[in-house]
Amino acid sequence: MEEFSARQLRERIAAGEVNSVEAVKGVFKRIDELEPTIGAYISTCRERAMERAAEVDGRIAAGEQVGELAGVPVAVKDNMCTTFGATTCASKILENFHAPYNATVVEKLLAADAVIVGKTNMDEFAMGSSTENSGLKQTVNPWDTSRVPGGSSGGSAAAVAGRLCYAAIGSDTGGSIRQPASFCGVVGLKPTYGRVSRFGLVAYGSSLDQIGPITRTVGDAALMMNVIAGHDPADSTSVDEETAGLCDYLAKLDEPIEKLKIAIVPEFNAGAAEAVTKALAEAIEVYKNLGAEIVEIDMAHLDYAIAAYYVIATAEASSNLARYDGVHYGHRSEKAADYVEVYTKSRAEAFGKEVKRRIMLGTYALSSGYYDAYYLKALKVRNLIRGDFAEAFEQCDCIMMPVSPTAAFKIGEKVDDPLTMYLCDIYTIAVNLAGIPGISIPCGFDGESLPIGLQILGSAFDEDRLLRIARMFEAQTNWNEKKPPIVE
Amino acid sequence: MEYKVIVGLEIHVQLCTRTKMFCGCAVEFGQEPNSRVCPVCLGMPGVLPVMNKQAFEYAVLVGLALNCEIPGFTKWDRKSYYYPDLPKNYQISQYDLPLSRNGFIEIPLKSGRSKRIRIIRAHLEEDAGKNLHSAGNYSQVDLNRTGTPLLEIVTEPDLNNGVEARALGVELQRIVRFLGVSEGDMQKGQMRFEPNINLVISRDGREYRTPIVEIKNLNSFRALERSIDYEEQRQLAEFLESGKVIEMGNKTTRGWDDQREVTVLQREKEEAHDYRYFPEPDLVPVELDKRWLEEIRSGLCELPITRQMRYVNEYKLSDYDAGVLTSERAISDFFDEAVKAGGDPKRVCNLLTQEGLRIAKERGSSIAELGIKAENVAKLAGLVESGTVSASASAPIFMQMVETNKDTWSIVNELNLIQKSDAGELEAIVEQALADNPDAVKDVTSGGKKSKKARGFLLGQVMQKTKGQANPKVVSEILTKKLG
């Protein structure tokens, strides 16, 4: 049963062939066995999950209609609010924070009868590319426990790869779904900005953050999208369905795109490790054999993406994180003598190094006298990058490139060198600046048997086609069927 | 040496929407602390704001009433500062693209003329909560007010004294009440003022400007006027003593001590406060198209000062009476209705300002709520005008109209208050009065100091004998004829 995709599991549960309680028990057996090593979860909710599973089973037995994720054990990144358990963002400042409401995605998962088994580890406030910035625990890569799972949704990706759930939800501000998915050999989709409600997602970079699925198959990503996508009146930036219609992402999933035109940016790909460029070339070959046409394009402004991103994301973060001040909720210093010290000491004690670094960067970028030189300029770069993509999509259906310059790196390898760490995001960041959707799917392994991901980018609100293009590859290969040795 | 006071105002007006600016919590004053809050206005992790359309429309309406330009595109910005009454530690406001700008307001002056004060901008933002310091050695925070729609109006420094500032405050209060967008209740903090004041002094052919002082959070017209008057004197004295003039960064902030009636220094140097404004990424910009703007404009009404001028110019009412009638929309509307029903404006005005407002005040309600019909007030005005009932008899008639809601004529008949104007009938009564009071007659006929008083006494005697129903004008004529 463990090797069922979420989609297969849901079908069998709904058909009464297997039951949700068994599936949840199986997941918790794995958690008992592997979680001490992997460390994917900040918290689990075994009892609650078992109750929910039994309830779903009961409704199926009674012949009732059940939701699209009926009985499927899923995990949620710990930066999405849940009324059960804590919502920590992997930060000491929110270590004991219990949200009074559910995020819209959480409501949608529950309405689809999913069984949430736990909240996954991440870089503190989603700031990082390795999950090493978690203020609460370490997560390792199930393929090689001496390596990072990627980040910031490292816990979600590791949980999916380690069979600690069937599917998970992550969030992606600069690659935080796609990069850990590629490091852990699973599928990760960052939808178009505005496609999935951000209400209840603890904000990092509000104009960049987007929630999406991390799954074992492309079909599961489509299934998850069917559940979580859509307009939310509580999120003014979520797109209304008249502007960008929703569809059943599973309906045409297995229909290949005819006359597929794929663009690559050769110059841009040159910086990746050999194993990565090789895997990319082989993946392109697969598409060529399926009749796809390849065009080479040039994107003039991609080189400026990282710089623009680290100004915009940190500026927004410096404001978004201002509320964690020890006054209304969260960690409050016991050493504060007056209200100003409540702020300074609470924040100094509970925020991690990377979070402080980004708050400083963002505060600086927004300061009077620097705004035009940094923030305003970054917004202009962002517009140019958007333009580059819009132009590119006039000539192609999708763009393919690596997800990350390398496969998963060693724990501790880059923690003391934030700039090198930032540069790892080179392939993922422009996508968030442009707001377009991107998916990472497994496309091979390097010499050390570490998974490599293929990144496919589509035009805004075109997730349907993006998923179908990804599925074309998946149907021809078996990379996604490989399992980390730890679960063998 | 000559000097001039220069005053600009920042005014905050709470809009009386049902719910808050960015969430569904009720806007209610005086409730139990922290009982009108939700995750959004508490600034919980993960929440997002959603704009209150009504608040936006109210704000645009005020912008229109202040003769502002209303751009078709406006956006939201975050203004960052740390304070316990601001849960997100940033306020959602408007920075470079406010919803209205470049307007003006006409304020009435004592002379009966008006003065035009330019408006720089009016923009929407969210109000903060309240820090309470009554608990001992710690403070408490009440966030009921957090997120209340707040309109910030900024004027050019076109005001020249406390009286003008007060007049602007009163006028603005009248406008927002007329438009129905705010109760403008100062005691509830629904209108708050922050004047910026300095002096321009001419001495020995040179001009000096004193450092600008901002007075924080004034919540009464009296405090507004007095604090400016006080600053005028204080700054003048300071200049004469120290010669200090305006420089970059020497703007100070002062508070108003209501008891001692002095301003008190709060912040010496306006430390270059950096609010780190940037566009609010959680809200989309507002695009106001022509149709929506016209829809909002249809909520506009004739402004109070325009009405006041109309009453003075067309109806020849005194400026004072016109001011009383236009102090509230309900009174003014009622007056207009009664005049439209044929009532003589001056008579209707007297009835409303003397009887109507007195009764309304006694009952703690407004004229509109007294239940009397404008049409009946017009009728009563007509009866007084024609001399059918006397001016003094109109009081009990008005009262009966409020209490019984009967037709004016039947009340007049029931109370038997039709005025006696028949000269023949009255002549006999006058003769009787003269016969009864020979001393008074002597005083009148001999002229001199006592004459006027004695004449009044005789008139009073006749009125008494007729139980007030004699037409005083006719009686007076008869007296003159008899006594010369």
Image (cartoon, grey):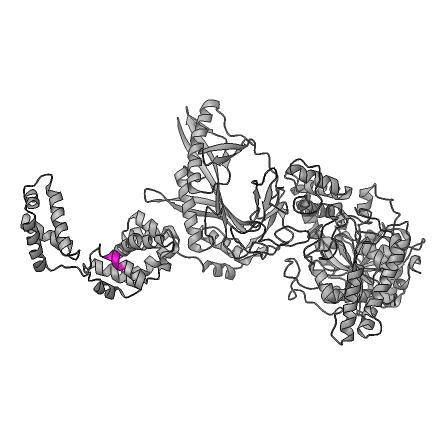
Q: Is residue B431 visible?
A: yes
Q: What span is colored magenta in the figure?
A: B392-397
Q: Is residue A162 visible?
A: no
Residue B192, position in %: x, y?
48, 44
Residue B396 among those drawn in magenta: yes
Question: Is A466 left or right of B93, judged from the image as shown?
Answer: right
Q: Nearer the viewer, residue A79 or B35?
A: B35
Residue lying at 42% horizontally and 51% vertically, measured from the top left: B175
Residue B401 among those drawn in magenta: no
User: From this viewpoint, which residue is outermost toward the bottom?
Assistant: A63
Residue lying at 81% horizontally and 68% vertically, measured from the top left: A20
Residue B38 against residue A247 in the figure, above or below: above
Residue lying at 68% horizontally and 67% vertically, measured from the top left: A245
Q: Nearer the viewer, residue A417 or B289?
A: A417
| Magenta residues, dominant SS class | helix
Residue lying at 26% horizontally and 64% vertically, measured from the top left: B408
Residue B170, position in %: x, y?
41, 46
